[in-house]
Amino acid sequence: RTHGVEVETGVLREQCDALNPVFFHYIRTKRPYVVMKYAMTLDGKIAAYTGASRWITREAARRHVHEMRHRYRGILAGVGTVLSDDPLLTCRIPGGRDPVRIICDSGLRIPMDSQIVKTAKEYRTIVAYAGEHSGEGCKEAEEKKEQLHAAGVETVSVPDADGRVDLRKLMEYLGKQSIDSVLLEGGGTLNDAALSAGIVNEICAFIAPKIFGGAGAKTPVSGIGVAHPAEAVMLTLRQMETIGDDLMLRYSVD
């Protein structure tokens, strides 16, 4: 410009940013890029009314999820998922990279005989909890932490004012741990908390050609919900693809 040369900035900026959203988000914010992933039926259920959820999608879609686990640096789930499903949360494809496993567990309820704890010395595992209070509860929490540390589990206390895990503080901590991206595989409670905390950058939904029905069957996002349609979390469609008989939709969170 000083020498009279015309310079145009921001050319194809959106398309360039889309090439590597994880990198650009992490460099700008020092917090991980969070992708919320869930599988549901066409009527929006992630489990039958009994709680049974295996399997909603077919094998091709499930393999794609393991490819996502390979792609992102961490995987986040709630203790409710651990208690109900006892998952391993690893990448089960040949040559795949296992993500750092992060469990939100306000009260340190994770069982010592769960697959997550039993394999913590093999796969890096972080349990985020909400701190301790004085008295007997504090002693029990300290004992549980010692047991978890002996099993190879790392713990971090990130409490909010209500005695739950503060997800924004957790993201700051994970960023300092060089975890630049997180695949959120939570249930409805954790998904609701993540959206409310504003930490979700992208949503990847797998929709199976099935109907479960049932007013009591679980949905991807629980909580109270919005009071008016205008208060909805707004999304922008980025990708739509069929994987076998299942449909994959990817959205960015506006």
Image (cartoon, rainbow, N blue to C red):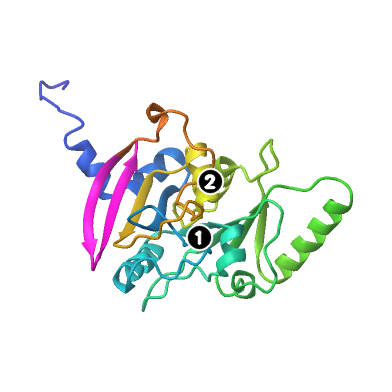
Q: Residue at x 25, y 46 (%)?
A: 238
Is 184 left, or right, of 133 in this rendering?
A: left
Q: Are marks 1 and 2 in contact (CB under 8 Å)?
A: no
Identify the secondary structure beneath mark 2.
helix
Give the residue number, with chain letter if any, for mark 2. Answer: 171
**Residue 92's spot in the image, x, y percent?**
41, 75
**Residue 5's spot in the image, x, y percent?**
10, 25
Q: Quadrant of the C terminus?
A: top left
**Residue 125's spot in the image, x, y percent?**
59, 64
Query: Residue furthest toward the bottom?
Result: 94
**Based on the displayed image, in which of its 4 quarters is residue 18 positioned?**
top left
Which three-letter amino acid code belongs to the residue tagged 1? Answer: Tyr
- Number of the label disc, if any, that sits on residue 49: 1
Q: Residues within 10 Å of mark 1 (few under 14, many from 20)?
A: some
Is 40 left, or right, of 136 in this rendering?
A: left
Q: Residue at x 46, y 66 (%)?
A: 53
Question: In the image, is residue 193 above or below residue 148?
Answer: above
Q: Which residues are magenta?
A: 236-254
